[in-house]
Image (cartoon, helix red, strand yellow):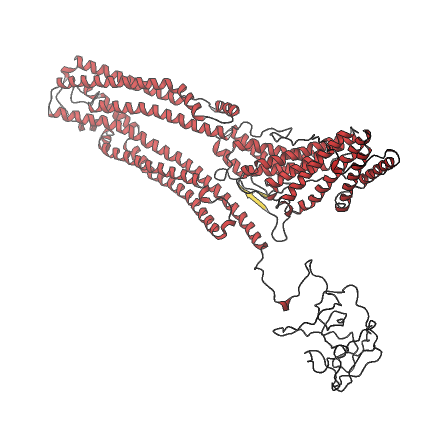
Amino acid sequence: MATFISVPLKKSSEVDLVKPLSKFVTVTYPAGEEQGEYLRSVEELSKLRKNALGRPLDKHESSLEILLRYYDQLCAVEPKFPFSENQLCLTFTWKDAFDKGSLFGGSVKLALASLGYEKTCVLFNAAALASQIASEQNLDNDEGLKAAAKYYQLASGAFGHIKDTVLSALNREPTMDISPETVGTLSLIMLAQAQEVFFLKATSDKMKDAVIAKLANQAADFYGDAFKQCQYKDNLPKYFYFQEVLPVLAAKHCIMQANAELHQSMLSKQKKRFGEEIARLQHAAELVKTVASRYDEYVSVKDLTDKINRALTAAKKDNDFIYHDRVPEVKDLEHIGKAALVKATSITPPLSQKFTDLFEKMVPMAVQQSMSIYGQRKADTVNRLVGTMREATNLCNGVLASLNLPAALEDLSGDSIPQSIAEKARAVVQLGGLQSIEQLIRDLPELLTRNREILDEALKMLNDEETTDNELRTKFNQRWNRTPSGDLYKPLRTEGANFRSILDKAVQADQVVKDRYNTHCEMIALLCKPENELTAAIPSANPTKTLQGSEVVNVLRSQLTQLDEIKKERETMEGEIKAVTFDMSTAFLTALAQDGAINEEALSVTQLDQLYGAYNQRVGASLSTQEQLLGQVQTSHQEFSSLKQSNTEGNQREEVLKKLASAHDSYVEISSNLREGTKFYNDLTEILLKFQNKCSDIVFARKTERDELLKELQQSIAREPSAPNFNVPAYQSTPAAPGGPTPAPRTVFQPQQPEQAKPGPPARPPPPSFTPVAASPMPPNAPATGPPIAGNPPPVAPPSQAQGPPYPTYQGYPGYFQVPMGYNPYGYGQYNMPNMPNMPNNIPYMPYQTTPGQQGYPGAPPAGQPSYPGYPQQPPQQQPYYPQQ
């Protein structure tokens, strides 16, 4: 009776985990000890998958432990890698567990770029293996019973978990073995078997009959639910597996119900309800009789039947001779209670007892994304503060250059180079002069072209794959059921358009820098000349030494000194702002653990305010102080200018000195801009290469998926009929019985039907057809066809079973049997007919026995009937042949 159902395992194709995961680790994490540890973990993950799925698994707990450990690792690694079709694309291929396929088409399989699909299939295999391990347990001892109940409940919980999560995990229609209907049915079956194990445990422990009856009745209820689930789902019985399971479930339902009635009858006997005892035993006997008659090949109930029959015989005997209690109807019996001691195991990772996360130190993707956004917010804050200070410094330098300060204070002699101008000239020469800037300007177009080529190549790969996908979708229509490439590539195209916009803006910025360089190129070249040539290029003017000790000059110098201090303070503050660091991963991990989600904006803004709030105040104060000083400088410069003797030479000299000071400031800014532009293009090249690799990976994955889908479509097309059904002409076939072809009967009474013409040679010659003597007497003027052959015995009865292959039947005349053999128009060797052309005479004649009261067969067609072509005619001079009576 102990027949338990187990589930077969799914089979998976090999997947290369090392290459894409290692590539992601290399790109995401800097080279070092941490990256090396993650790369080793990737290797371990690949080995773990091969151990779990790449070899046959024994029906042992150690094999189940490997599967559960791999499932736990998938759950742990899922939030730490961006597994998706358009990011880290890994395509997993699994075959249907129940579909065995055909000779040409192969079994049904599904390939998806989804880690949720891999998790679902691995959990299915864990449940299936748990059912197999449970079915192998020895149920004669407590350890085996406990283990079986444990594994059946685990299998039920795993199948139930798949039922609840498979549609959201796949986002498409799954294969039939992991569909919610199928796994829901399997969960019910496993739960019913676990309840049956508890019934066996209670029976072996000799618990009270009332308890055992309730356990058995609950098991019968579970089996009944599972049977209905199989029976009412149209798609489940298509599997041969479920066609074999259905009778077992029906039998188990009856057996558990019979056990419940048996133990309840014992309880009735204890309560001296002897009529009820007999009624329950009779019901139990009917149930096991049903099982024995319908499902004997699946489940044996001999022992249970003997036990029930013995109890029924004894109960009837006692009741007939002693108690004479009335036996009630089954419908009038009190319902047996139910006791469910089983519960599907909750699937909450980790399921493995010895699980350790291979990527324990790696933060989840949600934290990584939050860290990336926080880093961008921090960079924006730093750039805003630094940019504000630099803009203020450039404004200060521009105002001072327009006022020819401090050169105007230094050039009181009127014929020598001011100290500030000399220092600026030396600074320009040290920075590389014109050659440095011109080289940087020449490098920019090359860097720009390289970045554009990388971006164009990446987008071209997407366009080519999308074109191919659209062509195949047009060709196969609804059969091409994968995600359209146009929808899948939308994020990548948005990212590519953003890169294109960045490059266009960079080109515009480069042009602004070039225009500024062209404006100040002449003065920058003058600063690069030797000191004597620079002195000669600056016009001389009348001396103004009388202003050397004036109060206005001293005030201006004091104000310029204060501005220089502000500039130095800003340089120091800029370094401090750039050096601020804070690890937000701890805060994000804490928020993820507490709330299950991360409010990145609130956490980041709060932390950035704490880090840079003081710097915002200091920058604001610096700008305010500079604005006041510049106002004071302009007022003091007006007084200074009014004291100077105004002449043409002096004005020309002052104008050149202004241009030289402005050229120095422009040179420094242009040089800085060009170096930043070069760094920008080089950094963008790395980003674009990552983008190109991402596009290449997803295109490769899509091509692999496309090849798999094409292969499946070709196999499905090969399984389809090559042409639609059509009506076969009547002369080419004979009607077949509904149950399949059967040999044609040798002797049948059939009414005479007209012959149908058979178009086209060669025509099959029909069998000889004769007119019976009794039905159509011979005309007196009919020509003789042959002498009578004496000693023709009566024909024998036809054989009871057709021999040899089925031959086509031919209709005879009413009242007579057809020739009792398969007709062969060329094989006349069974009859020894002398004087016939081309016929052997050495074959003995087999007499044909007639039945009493039956005429024999005539030797030739009667007069007036046409002869059949191809049938050898008798010589015309011979007398007609009539078989003996």
Residue drawn where x is 58% and y is 57% of the image: 721
Q: Is residue 47 left or right of residue 450?
A: right
Q: Nearer the viewer, residue 299 or 213?
A: 213
Q: Nearer the viewer, residue 831 or 881?
A: 881
Where is residue 420? Give x, y as percent.
24, 22
Residue drawn where x is 48% and y is 32% of the image: 28
Where is residue 44? Give x, y as percent.
59, 34
In the depicted structure, whether residue 645 falls above or below residue 687:
above
Q: Is residue 377 left or right of residue 321?
A: left
Which quadrant: the N terminus?
Answer: top right
Residue 241's image quarter? top right
Q: Report if residue 643 is visible in the image.
A: yes
Q: Nearer the viewer, residue 266 or 609?
A: 266
In the depicted structure, whether residue 298 falls above or below residue 646:
below
Where is residue 325? Give x, y as percent.
83, 34
Residue 98's image quarter? top right
Q: Is residue 697 left or right of residue 835?
A: left
